[in-house]
Amino acid sequence: GKSTLLALASRLIKPSSGEIYIDGMNLKDYKEQILAQKISILKQQNNINLRLKVEELVAFGRFPHSQGRLNANDKIKINEALEYMGLSNLKNEFLDTLSGGQKQRAFIAMIIAQDTEFIMFDEPLNNLDMKHSV
């Protein structure tokens, strides 16, 4: 149920019936960029097949705002998300060298950096140790 709802909200699948409204507007009427600035979604399984550093992954969260051209405000949001998730000291580490919990925190930091009105998580505490899940 939750995973299906998130797939519907992110338009990965189309509803077989009915309509979905976010903030009073039909989901199908949103332009992609506007929707990405309004909601962020973290799926249960996150696999990236690129060799990225933590900071690069978190910077992806700013794409709906910057279209890949980071400005000073984007860099502030990225650094705030890294700090909030306790990842500042790991920002230059490659994702494939991190523990499962550190990786999950990096994905959560990416969602935080996206700075949307609505955040939707599917099992966000997966792989987190007790200290970070509380």
Image (cartoon, helix red, strand yellow):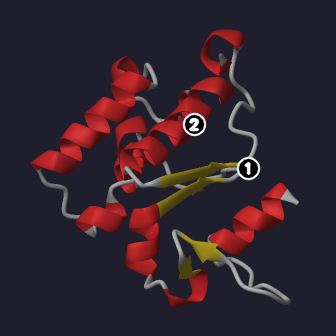
Please report the residue visible at 39 percent of the width from the left and 52 percent of the height from the top.
Answer: 114
Mark 2 or 1, nearer chain start: 1
Quarter of the figure that contains the C terminus: top right
Between 71 and 94, the one lying in front of the other is: 71
Residue denoted by label 2:
96
Please report the residue visible at 57 percent of the width from the left and 26 percent of the height from the top.
Answer: 102
Please state the horizontal and vertical placement of residue 72, each as a whole percent of the image.
Answer: 11, 47
Task: Reply above or below: 22 against 15.
Answer: above
Please report the residue visible at 82 percent of the width from the left and 66 percent of the height from the top.
Answer: 4
Report which quarter residue 19 is drawn in: bottom right
Between 57 and 41, the one lying in front of the other is: 41
Please state the horizontal and vertical placement of residue 74, each as a whole percent of the image.
Answer: 22, 49
Please say whether residue 99 is visible from this viewpoint. no
Callout 1 amino acid: Gln
Please report the residue visible at 34 percent of the width from the left and 49 percent of the height from the top.
Answer: 59
Task: Assign a secondary structure to mark 1.
Answer: loop
- Give the Cα distance between marks 2 and 1: 15 Å
What is the residue that sits farthest to the right in this orientation? 1
Residue denoted by label 1:
45
Task: Reply above or below: 63 against 117.
Answer: below
Please state the horizontal and vertical placement of residue 76, each as a whole percent of the image.
Answer: 20, 38
Left or right: residue 15 compared with residue 67: right
Quarter of the figure that contains the N terminus: bottom right
Please state the horizontal and vertical placement of residue 17, each as a whole percent of the image.
Answer: 84, 89
